[in-house]
Image (tube, rainbow, N blue to C red):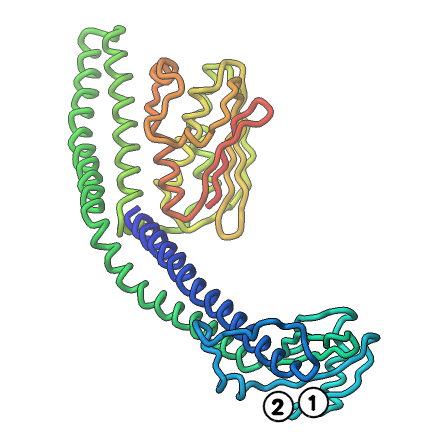
């Protein structure tokens, strides 16, 4: 439980850090992209104004990008671009490649032919282009600005951001892991104290219960059995079962507990537990059938496996009405086993997950008369969890079905 709590703390903290880094670095990259796009737009407009002047373009005011976007005459002169002139039908008249070294006239004309008919601005390959037309409407000039260096700059910032973000995330994981131990230390101490209290109290209670049971039986030898002695023995047995389940639950959740394991015959274990409850089932006219695959051998603790089967069968016998039925099935599953215990169930219970809550009672009067405290299934789930297994419950076709897979 402590390790699970620590993992959740680290997971939550790292999710928050991931969101923060994503928002921060994402905002930087979005701003960088927008800045470069605007910068190239201003630069292209300036070049178009100057290149198209001989054609008497309809541009009333020269664009001024010398402010925030840092476009000046020096930046304009260092820009790499070429110009292609066409007539109104889109036929190429000439190409000027004097301001770019990497493009020939033939290449410039091929690039210009890739422009969609009627398009006045846009992108083609790594070039951003715009167009202007002379006042008489006979010639249109297409100016292609090479934005390869800007694109690479944007990509470089993006890759650096991802790298820096990954490094920061990794560096933050170490202090977060260390701080998680400090943060949950008081909670861990309280949980450990509670577990020790339950364990110590359980062991202390077992002795008085044994003495009460022994004295009651001795009293019956002298005075004979009566309803008071029967009640004393019944309640003593209930407390004994409750104590054992609480000790099992505390031990199962105790961190660092080593579980003695050996090769056990689960088939024999299930068979023995089934036979132990057969008489109780017959007293209520309950049909108890078992399909047990022979020689199912697993490496586990025999006492804990027996406790799981005992809890499920005890639960079934208690809450199955007279003339009902109980079905037990055991199969080998890989290196483990699959156990199914089902019994007739006449209630419309849908939230079966609550059955595993500690001291859960849907009907306290029924639970009291049945002799249960609502902790047996919690103990069974804790034991199954020790083996990294799974226990579930579902209501289907008038049956409540418990399945265990270890």
Going by the image, does 299 lie left or right of 78?
A: left
Residue 224 on image: x %, y %? 23, 7
Residue position for label 2 = 99
Establish if 93 lies above or below 136. Answer: below
Provide the secondary structure element on which disc 2 rests: loop
Please report the residue visible at 36 percent of the width from the left and 34 percent of the height from the top.
378
Residue position for label 1 = 96
Within the image, what quadrant is residue 194 found in? top left
Please report the residue visible at 62 percent of the width from the left and 93 percent of the height from the top.
101
Q: Is residue 143 or residue 150 the one in the foreground?
A: 143
Q: Is residue 125 or residue 211 the one in the foreground?
A: 125
Spatial CA distance of label 2 from label 1 is 8 Å
Please report the residue visible at 37 percent of the width from the left and 43 percent of the height from the top.
302
Establish if 41 lies above or below 261. Answer: below
Q: Are marks 2 and 1 in contact (CB under 8 Å)?
A: yes
Within the image, what quadrant is residue 240 found in? top left
Going by the image, does 329 lie left or right of 116?
A: left
Residue 177 on image: x %, y %? 28, 59
């Amino acid at each position: 439980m402590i390790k699970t709590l620590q993992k959740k703390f680290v997971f939550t903290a790292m999710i928050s850090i991931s969101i923060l880094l994503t928002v921060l670095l994402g905002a930087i990259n979005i701003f960088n992209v927008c800045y470069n796009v605007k910068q190239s737009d201003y630069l292209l407009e300036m070049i178009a104004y100057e290149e198209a002047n001989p054609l008497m373009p309809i541009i009333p005011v020269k664009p001024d990008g010398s402010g925030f976007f840092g476009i000046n005459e020096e930046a304009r002169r260092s820009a790499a671009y070429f110009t292609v002139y066409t007539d109104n039908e889109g036929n190429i008249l000439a190409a000027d490649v004097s301001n770019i070294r990497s493009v020939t006239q033939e290449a410039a004309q091929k690039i210009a032919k890739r422009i969609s008919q009627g398009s006045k601005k846009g992108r083609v390959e790594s070039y951003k282009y715009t167009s202007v037309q002379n006042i008489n409407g006979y010639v249109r000039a297409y100016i292609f600005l090479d934005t390869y260096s800007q694109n690479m700059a944007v990509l470089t910032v993006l890759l650096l951001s991802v790298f820096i973000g990954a490094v920061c995330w990794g560096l933050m994981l170490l202090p977060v892991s260390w701080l998680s131990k400090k943060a949950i230390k008081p909670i861990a101490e309280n949980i450990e104290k509670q577990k020790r209290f339950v364990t110590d109290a359980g062991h202390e209670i077992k002795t008085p219960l044994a003495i009460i049971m022994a004295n009651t039986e001795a009293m019956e030898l002298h005075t004979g059995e009566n309803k008071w002695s029967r009640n004393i023995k019944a309640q003593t047995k209930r407390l004994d079962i409750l104590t054992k389940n609480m000790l099992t639950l505390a031990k199962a959740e105790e961190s660092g507990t080593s579980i003695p394991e050996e090769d056990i015959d689960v088939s024999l274990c299930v068979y023995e537990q089934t036979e132990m409850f057969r008489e109780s089932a017959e007293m209520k006219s309950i049909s108890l059938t078992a399909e047990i695959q022979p020689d199912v051998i697993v490496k586990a603790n025999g006492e804990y496996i027996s406790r799981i089967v005992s809890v499920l069968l005890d639960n079934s016998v208690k809450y199955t009405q007279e003339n009902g039925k109980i079905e037990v099935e055991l199969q080998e599953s890989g290196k483990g086993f699959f156990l199914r215990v089902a019994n007739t169930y006449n209630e419309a219970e849908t939230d079966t997950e609550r059955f595993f809550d500690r001291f859960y009672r849907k009907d306290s009067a029924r639970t009291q008369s049945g002799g249960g405290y609502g902790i047996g299934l919690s103990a069974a789930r804790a034991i199954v969890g020790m083996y990294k297994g799974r226990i579930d419950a579902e209501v289907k076709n008038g049956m409540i079905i418990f399945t265990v897979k270890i």
